[in-house]
Image (tube, rainbow, N blue to C red):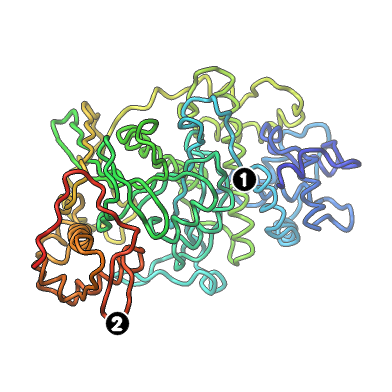
Amino acid sequence: MLRDRYAVPVPGSVGDAQGVFGPGHLGELTRHLLVDLVDAVVEETRTVQRRMRCLPSRVGVYFVLALALFPSLGYLRVWDKLTTGLKARPHPRPSEKALRDLRRRLGPAPLKAVFEVVAGPLAQPRTPGVCYRRWRTVAFDGCSSVKVPDHERNRAWLGRIATASGWAGYPMLRLMALCETGTRGLLGAVFGPIGEYETTYAQRLLPLLTPRMLLLADRGFDSNAFLQQIADTRAQFLIRLNHRRRPGVLAVLPDGSYLTRLGNLRVRVLDAQVTVTTSGGNRLSEHYRLATTLLDHRRDPASALVRLYHERWEVESAFYALRHTLLDGLVLRSQDPTGLAQELWAQLTVYQLLRMAMVEAAESRPGTDPDRAGFTIALETARDHVILATGRDDTTSIAVGAIGRAVLAGLLPPRRKRISRRRVKAPISRYHSRPADPRPTHSQRITHLNIDIHQATATPPPPVVDTPHDVRRASLGPGVSGAGHRNRTLQLMAADPDRAWHPRELAKALGIHNTKSFGTQMLTWLADGFLRKIRRGTYVLTDAWTPRTEGLTAPTIP
């Protein structure tokens, strides 16, 4: 791994920060990104300067990182931040063109390599909130709100965003990150055009998963093929399923969850109704259907896993800190794809360095949850020390630095249980409206939270209407139900396992009038491995489904 490759300083590298190398620093953050490491990365990516002039490559790497630390300032203003605190020897002030040429000379490769070095788990397993049992909890999700300049070279790469009222003002790129939920540190990240699916980007992050991790993800990542790819990494997962998916019941467990198969993968499904009561007197309820590879209901009770799933939202907090606090919601600088890649890798690196300083501070005080460390406090303190050029030579001290002391002095209070409506921060129209949302407009405190685990049965309960979109869908009238018809169909076929069935025969026996839709659903069950096709339009039951739940009775065969 790159982290191991660069763990030892390169012999003969320039370790001092004098002369032309003076501006090559990030203040106290230099403790977490040593100059020897940067020199090794520059040499590895073959971007070392050919001649020793006023702007060596090491200084260029730190300058690009400083641009990410001060996103609202121009090149010369950022250069002034790096050199103001260097009183020992005045440094020449280059032109904007020279700094722009420096960025072009480096390219994105050194910044990407630096991020790959610093990316990874940050906290010790004993740190509060980092692990569930023996697994480190991680999550990934996508962010599609990173805006780039509206230039033809950017549009050629990212395309344009079409909306109901016309073209969007800026092209956008999609950022996909794998995050450690306990610290919100990044284990890896990829980005590209917004037109590609999130699962396409997420597949590139799967090699970062290890058997010591428990992955949390939303229902956009619940396809059978993708779940199988996660399982192939030997990592555990706890992923929310789409409400339209109703897997067949293989065996009911005492805690109400049940075993099933998604494709060829054996998983455990939890159907839970989460009800909260707020301080304003509102009572809200939402349905969650979770799939997990943790099959032992004794060690991992259903209620504990439902509560754990809430940690998935930590990746959203990471995106908020990256997009709105560090970048301040601004549009990126670069007008070409190469510059965008360099700039975004620098943003991710600076974010990770700040998280490293925050976790170091939290772990210096035993029992402190890293969630209580304020990102804004760490960011502003880091900016101050870049200007003062202090702490950059303190690379051997094991004590908490100035950033850590500022974080500890301003620890946030323990996390409060609150709920509010999700809102579009930048709607296309100021008359923008969303379907009715029962959640309160402003944040309210949760006074009571109740988790009810639905007991799995042969015919699962009717569809749970938990979002405004589901309300509209339910109003369209009844259709072909997935799991209810599946379980009834499989039970009917299990009553006479040697018989070959035609969809019309099964539909008539079950009282289903829409035989065409029912036949389409049987093709889905065929792909899931529950049925086997012996000839055109004729199916038999496979061994993947056996009615082992208690109290099941098969329908009467006509």
SS at mark 2 in the image: loop
Residue on which the image places disc 2:
536
Seen in the picture, residue 540 relative to 385 is either above or below; the reply is below
Q: Quadrant of residue 361?
A: top right
Q: Earlier in the sequence, mark 1 or mark 2?
A: 1
> Residue 533 at x, y = what percent?
32, 74
- The residue lying toward the viewer, choosing from 304 and 79, is 304
Residue at left 49%, top 21%?
368
Answer whether residue 476 is visible to the viewer in this image: no
User: In front here: 12 or 100?
Assistant: 12
Q: Is residue 11 left or right of residue 5?
A: right
Look at mark 1 in the image and give the residue it sits on: 349
Q: Answer above or below: position of 346 versus 164.
A: above
Considering depth in this image, is 316 or 91 the residue closer to the camera?
316
Q: How would you rate the neighbour count of disc 1 (Cα within 10 Å): few for under 14, some for 14-19, many for 20 or more? A: many
Q: Residue furthest bottom?
A: 536
| Extreme residue in the front direction | 498
Closer to viewer: mark 1 or mark 2: 2
Can you say whether 364 is above or below 52 in the image? above
- Report how far apart the C-alphas of labels 1 and 2 lie in the structure: 57 Å
Residue at the (58%, 54%) spot, across then down: 344
